[in-house]
Amino acid sequence: MLARRAWLVVLGVVGTGSIGYVVLVRVITSPGSRPGEGLGWLLFGVLPLYAFGLWLLTATSSRLAIYVALGATGSAVGSAYETFVWTNPDVLESPTFALFNQIGLTADGLAATGFLLMIASFPDGILERRWQRVVLRLVWLGVLVGPATLLTYDHVVLPQYIGLDVPPIPNPYVVPALEPLQPFVENVLLEWWVIPLLALTVFYWRGLFSGAARRSQMRVMVIAVTCTLVMYMLWETSAIMGIDGTPFGTAVTVLVATCMVALPVAGIHGILRYGAYDIALADRGRVVMQSSTTLITIIYAWAVAAPGVLLSRVLPSATAVLLTACIAVLLLPVRGWLSRWIRRTVFGDHDEQHRLLGDLGTRLEQAVDLDEVLSRLAGGVRDGLGASWVRIRLAAPDGRTVDTPDAVAGTVSGEPAIGLDLTRGDLVIGRIDLGPARSGAYGLAELSLLETVARQATTAVANVRLTAELADQLRELTASRTRLITAQDEERRRIERNLHDGIQQSVVALIAGLRLARNRLGRGELSQTELAELQDQARETLSDLRELAQGIHPQVLTDNGLIPAIESRTARYPIPLTIAASDDVRHRRWGADIEAIAFYTVREALANVAKHSGATCASVAVSTTPNSLRVVVSDDGTGFDLTSRNGSPGGLANIRDRVGVVGGRVSVTSTPEHGTRLTVDLPIDLPVEQPRESARV
């Protein structure tokens, strides 16, 4: 971005200053210095490409934009140099003219190099073959034409376009030891046929012998460049034959300028059809409209000014001005019609677009089911854009688009012609693919309409999908609550049975024994042995109470924390078990609910491993992430098929219910014969460093 702005500032200042200088001198200060040639070439040959190049620098960071702007700026500087020399002939006698002449030669080299690189690497700067990249690096040698002639020629080499018939001007900066290189400099750099030939070889090879897609992308540019080359050769021939001032020479000049305007037209076509210059699909409408507006303005100015400039030698000034004004008035309606036609071509018929959007909106509003929304969306897009088929796929929760289509309109055949992601914020919720158009090809109007439809459809799809997800979550929540209530009822009944069948009977027996001891004490028959038996009976009852409480909530979990509780509970696990936890995790405490859920999750998971897995070893790993306490239970057992409800252990439902109460996440990876891995993430706040105090029973 910074480099692009730097190029824009530098080339904008240099080029605009050069063009302004030429116009000021040719029109106002020295109107008699070849106005029909120098000014006409600047306005109709240089200015369209210069405006197009600078505009490209504002729209894209592609190096092709730099090539266009660099070439046009070099041409503008060359025109300014020519104008200065023609209006200040005394500069030829300056002892430093040889250095000053470097401006003209370097500008000429930069102009040719920029244009050659631009057309040779059109439309995206990507060259298919290695030899093509090597050849285009050699094109940069053209920039060295100025320093090369300065060091090898004993006289000043003027730019070919300057057209001055003067005696040889001595070059005081020549290096005699380098004079033997003069033939190379003359034939390769100065004559300018080797380097253009290299670049044009790459260009025509790519345009004629590349793949079908690349040839299609370059077809219009090949035609524009070929016409420009033919007209340019005619122009050079007329100058050599001395007929450039005749009507034939004037007509050739006009044709050359016309072809120069055709180059940005071909560039705009590349943007419109193929995203040339790395301009994204979303920006093409804006880009093409700005380009076409600039181009229409240039063409309008050209058509208005051309007669006055080209006929200034044969018409009086007043007549030329009147002619220019009349043409300007007559062409105003044409300019407006052309602007409207381009806008309609680029963005399509607004009435038709509004009708399609209205019909599609009505279709989506009437649909309440996700499948119905997608089906109506696919059908509406197919009818509105004239696609042979439309396919819509929704993305999985991880953002990947699933392969199985969720809705199809038409018969899918071959690869999609265009496609667009359905995005909501930064989240990709799906993708819509269009087959080839039933008539012709998709234009920018269809692409722009597809983007608008996609934005509208994304909201509808996201809302229906969210509704479906909420309904699924509600059903799962209801089922989870039912399972929790059922589990709580079963646990309560188990505790009641244990109290009734075990501890209650022990307490009743203890009360009866105490009553008997009291009676025997009244008769003086009570012995110490009977009291010791009653004490042992009370101790056994206390032990039973502790075991019952241990089943409800382990005391070691309350006193010592999660890891000691897990180790205590699994001390006699029937298969080899590894428990991994860092010292930091081992000595930290979390909320009572989190520790209890983690403990019972491990207990339930290990029970599943022992009952169902057939494993030879298992492991428990407890760690922390920035926002959660992570518990991983894995084994090397037989595993199970996750897609089968009958294959998964029933304890997983209990684990999911328990973890879901605090908003945790459960993930299971299991492959038959390759073991199972259960990962539970429980949300945590800042850990509690000190163990909590508790009363012992």
Image (spheres, helix red, strand yellow):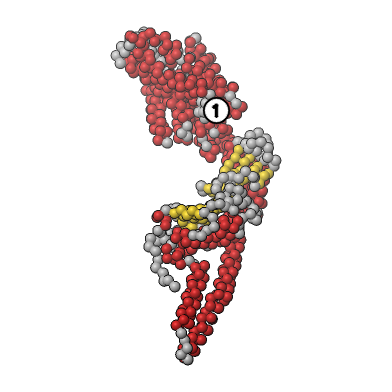
Q: Secondary structure at mark 1?
A: helix
| Residue extending furthest toward the bottom | 523
Q: Is residue 508 visible?
A: yes
Check the picture and name the quadrant holding the C terminus.
Answer: bottom left
Q: On the image, which quarter does residue 92 sit in?
A: top left
Left or right: 528 as drawn, with respect to 174 = right
Of residues 315 and 338, which is closer to you in this image? 338
The vertical placement of 533 against 422, above or below, is: below
- At horizontal 47% and vertical 27% (from top left) the residue drawn is 68
- At horizontal 46% and vertical 67% (from top left) the residue drawn is 555
Q: What residue would you read off at disc 1? A: 266
The vertical placement of 403 against 97, above or below, is: below
Left or right: 455 as drawn, with respect to 554 = right
Q: Is residue 538 visible?
A: no
- At horizontal 58% and vertical 51% (from top left) the residue drawn is 637
Q: How many numbered discs, if any?
A: 1
Left or right: 417 as drawn, with respect to 524 = right
How packed mark 1 is, by other alpha carbons closer than 10 Å (few <14, some 14-19, many 20 or more), is: some
| Residue extending furthest toward the left | 95
The vertical placement of 334 against 679, above or below, is: above
Check the picture and name the quadrant holding the N terminus.
Answer: top left
**Residue 414: horizontal and vertical position, in percent?**
66, 36
**Residue 260: horizontal and vertical position, in percent?**
51, 23
Of residues 574 and 399, which is closer to you in this image? 574
**Residue 289: horizontal and vertical position, in percent?**
53, 36
Of residues 467 and 554, which is closer to you in this image? 554
Q: Amino acid at mark 1?
A: Ala
- At horizontal 48% and vertical 14% (from top left) the residue drawn is 193
